[in-house]
Image (cartoon, grey):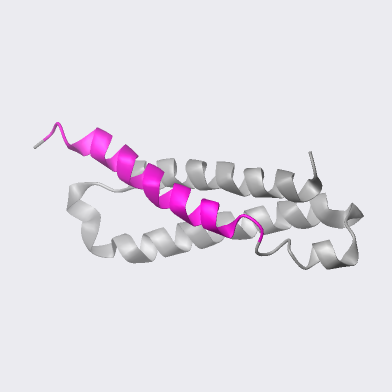
Amino acid sequence: MDHLDKIYYMRAFLGVICGIILGFLFNPSNSSSAIGIIFTVGLIFYIISYVIAKKMGLRLKTEDRKKISTNGIFPFMFLLVMFMIVTYTGLYTASH
């Protein structure tokens, strides 16, 4: 597997983990500050993935190093949102 592929899947996996954590953080009583929390926690996880990707990409060619910051950003965002919604729905649907 190529290094850029590993970075892609690592970001997708971190998006899943972040989405599950955010799903557990929210409850129906604190939904007013949800956007700020989602953005902050998502940004923290993305920065963590960037640091890991930089360490993984030390052996890449120069033109591939430019792709480190953007490789896997869409799976990260969409999996974060999807798993946050699934986790939140699974936890709080039965309570209403």
Q: Which one is in front, 1 or 96?
A: 1
Q: Which residue corresponds to the image point at 48% horizontal and 56% vertical from the top-left?
A: 77
> The N terminus lies in which quarter of the figure?
top right
Residue drawn at point x = 39 percent, y = 59 percent: 38
The answer to whether residue 11 is magenta is: no
Q: Position of residue 25 (x, y in %)?
A: 35, 46
Name the chief secondary structure element in magenta.
Answer: helix
Outermost residue to the left = 96
Measuring from the top left, give residue 22's x and y in whole percent: 39, 48
Query: Which residue does the image show at 50% across and 41% down from the upper left?
Result: 17
Figure check: 53 above or below 40? above
Q: Is residue 46 above or below residue 25?
A: below
Q: Nearer the viewer, residue 12 or 51?
A: 12
Instruction: Identify the residue at horizontal 20%, vertical 38% (top origin).
Output: 92
- In the image, 74 versus 18, the foreground residue is 74
Decide if residue 59 is on the left or right side of residue 45.
right
Q: Is residue 91 left or right of residue 96?
A: right
Q: Which residues are magenta?
A: 71-95
Residue 71 coordinates in the image, percent (x, y): 66, 58
Magenta stretch: includes residue 78: yes
